[in-house]
Amino acid sequence: MARIELSHVTKRWGGFYAVDDLDLIIEDNAFVTLLGPSGCGKTTTLRMIAGLETPTTGKITIDGVTVFDSDAGINIPANKRRVGFLFQNYALWPNMTVYQNIAFGLSNIKEAGLSVTDNGEIVRNPSAGGAVRKLTKAEIDKIVARVSAIVKIQPFMDRYPGELSGGQQQRVAIARTLAPGPRVLFMDEPLSNLDAKLRLEMRSELQRLHLSTGSTFVYVTHDQMEAMTLATRICLISNGVLQQYDEPLKVYNQPNNTFVADFVGNPAINFMNARGAQQADGSFSLKLLDDYEAVFTPSERVNTEDWYREADADIAAFEAKVRPAEKTNKDVPFNYPIHTVTDAPAPPAPDREDWVLGVRPEFIHISEDGPVEGEVFSAMPTGMETTVRIKVGNYLLTGVVFGGVLYKIGQKIRLSFSGDGATLFSRVNGRLVATGSLSVKK
């Protein structure tokens, strides 16, 4: 299997930086999702690792072997990197049976030190010497039997792709990709052509496949639900720049900035502008939702002066990076959404006493004695849970209530913010300051 390392990898066309100075380590046997909006650079990153796209600058190693180095002039072609690629389009030969589709690429393998175990695994040992040879028909049969069993398509070996469902065709494509024994399996939105129910089933299959093969998986998606449920780590990219690279729950609970907080989570996080100062005990005394006074208590104490000093230095270092061409796709601050009933005037330019509070819908608690008064703007029950939009003054907050609870539009309710999952961001730079609890004064 393989560990992948990207060092200062950049891909640009003129002044457009599709990937901007990316440093990334993907550990052996990891399942990493490259996540982000359309055009953010995630597919370009995948294609550069696979060898289907040539980086402008940087270095890429797979399993300790340098496959690209702009300074040394190294660029190993894709067919020599021993990687598998699973596309959004299944790309199956319609005139070939399932068996023939899986076996097609195996007939082109020609290496020294090649052998196949009894259970159908390819063993490569070029240092053992011996003549360059191809796989025999019996060896191909073993390999096809093994990979078809992994994805559970043995009963369909004599069928043609047109006789299979979308999910079955995707399983054939996965088996064909696994057959040559790739060190890394790349997947570019492989489930987007499937319906919602089948996508859920295939997510489970891919998770099981990752464990059974022990391979390193790199998976591109714009669907944050796929990223959350499949990955061991999420690599979230925006405008070619890495925003966060962490375990899924850390990305969800401790987002690096307002962009990450907004992109991950369904229903989306609630943002509220707030103003106030840090107190001697480390808490923040804030005013939010126009009329309410609140206290934000960080889970871990933070000194805002030190925090701003480090953030300013980090931002300055990023802006000072030497680029051979001016970046035309400028890095602009994320315009986080504040949902209102009617259009509200833009807030004044922020200073260091302006903050953004983020509260996930599951932390909005509806109760009779809640300090915040609201009105049900809409209610969408799904059986297991109800998504409620609550009007507080001119603002709209989204909450999730678990269980079969019914609310009427216009119903008066009261709410509070429960738990310690609130997030405090700086309005000046959009970065996470702290996570903690938020209490509103009655």
Image: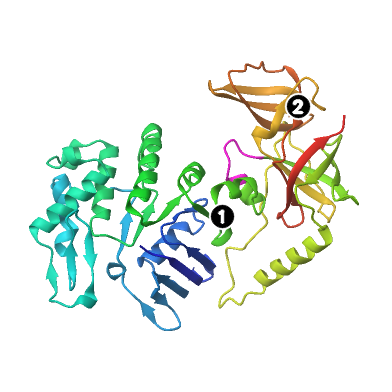
Please, what secondary structure does the residue beneath circle 2 have? strand
- Please name whichever residue, 344 or 203, is drawn nearer the observer in this view of the structure: 203
Report the side of 339 relative to 110 (left or right): right
Q: Residue furthest right?
A: 280
Q: Name which quarter of the figure residue 83 lies in.
A: bottom left
Q: Residue at x 9, y 56 (%)?
A: 138
Report the side of 378 relative to 71 (left or right): right
Q: Is residue 279 above or below residue 123?
A: above
Q: Is residue 371 above or below residue 427?
A: above
Give the magenta range: 262-269
Q: Amino acid at mark 2?
A: Leu
Instruction: Report the residue marked by disc 2.
Output: 415
Instruction: Report the residue marked by disc 1.
Output: 246
Q: CA distance from mark 2 to mark 1?
A: 32 Å
Q: Residue furthest front?
A: 118
Q: Amino acid at mark 1?
A: Asp
Main SS, magenta residues: loop
Q: Residue at x 28, y 38 (%)?
A: 166
Image quarter in which the N terminus is found: bottom left
